[in-house]
Amino acid sequence: MGFIIAALVVGGTGLFIGVFLGVAGIKFAVEVDEKEVAVREALPGNNCGGCGYPGCDGLAAAIAKGEAPVNACPVGGEPAANEIAAIMGQEVGESVREVAFVKCGGDCEIAKENYKYTGVQDCEMMAFVPSGGAKKCNYGCLGFGSCVKACPFDAIHIVNGVAVVDKEACKACGKCIAKCPKHLIELVPYDQTTFVHCSSKDKGKVVTSSCDIGCIGCKKCEKNCEAGAITVTDFVAHIDYSKCTNCGKCKEECPRNVIF
């Protein structure tokens, strides 16, 4: 008899809990936005944060609410943008593919050193070593690959002491930009072919003693650019990519061969 009572108590308790959970599930159910779900499925799922939102879930929610454009995902690019636009019933709009670029050409053969460094291979650790690293130029690439470790797409590598971006693999997520302690990496148009490979703000004499190609701020490139796309500020040339026609005139005029 005791066994029967125990079984009835356990069964009744289970039944009560089941009914309670079922009612609670209906009462407290969270409404699912079907568009948000569809947008999330169209996103690549890298959760890189390159869109400025906390992962793909955050971006999907923002797009579904109309708070983010349909082409906000740099990793998915045009294919994802077109699919999301169809889901949202919107036009994709104009978008320009971008890739990361490292503003330094001071490799092991070009940049000069104060000493030989054999410690921890990490760019961020250089803040704790003499002169901020072995290179004489305090603005150049340290070459220890913190950006390489941060890139989820294997799109950046250290080549002869300098970080170099594989533009075909780069998704413009911006993680390398955030990781570089020297702030040497920027996003540029994919079709851009003319670049200043220097970020030094030192004056000419200091630059020439530190690097064989560093910009000395002579302004020859600025004076000869017919498009007005290149200017010299803080002793280093800067290109306005929205104006640059990639004519190559600045490269021809540069006495230091710092414009590639």
Image: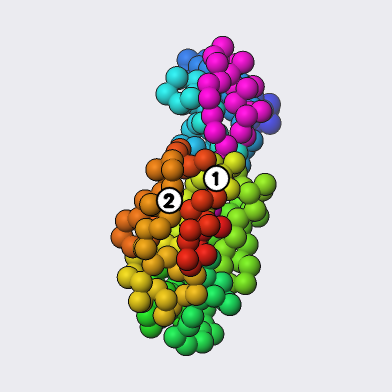
- Is 110 a magenta residue? no
Q: Is residue 158 above or below residue 210?
A: above
- Provide residue 237's location: percent of width, then percent of height: 40, 56
Residue density around tag 2, few if under 14, some if 14–19, many if 20 or more, within 10 Å: some
- Provide residue 120's location: percent of width, then percent of height: 52, 78
Q: Is residue 7 above or below residue 206?
A: above
Q: Which mark identifies residue 47?
A: none
- Say how many tags the image has: 2
In the picture, the quarter occupied by the N terminus is top right
Identify the amino acid type marked 2.
Asn
Cα distance, mark 2 to mark 1? 11 Å
Report helix, strand or loop for mark 2. Answer: helix
- Provide residue 130's location: percent of width, then percent of height: 38, 83
Identify the amino acid type marked 1.
Cys
Residue 202 found in image quarter: bottom left
Of badges 2 and 1, the one in the foreground is 2
Report helix, strand or loop for mark 1. Answer: loop
Is residue 146 in view from this perspective?
A: no
Residue at 62% x, 72% y is 160
Q: How is the image coloured?
A: rainbow
- Is 83 a magenta residue? yes
Residue 71 found in image quarter: top right
Residue at 63% x, 67% y is 159
* Left or right of residue 197: residue 153: right
Q: N-terminal of the two: label 2 or label 1? A: 2
Q: Is residue 57 above or below residue 50?
A: above
Q: Which residues are magenta?
A: 76-102
Residue at 67% x, 47% y is 168
Residue at 48% x, 58% y is 253
Q: Which mark identifies residue 224?
A: 2
Per the image, the residue denoted by label 1 is 247
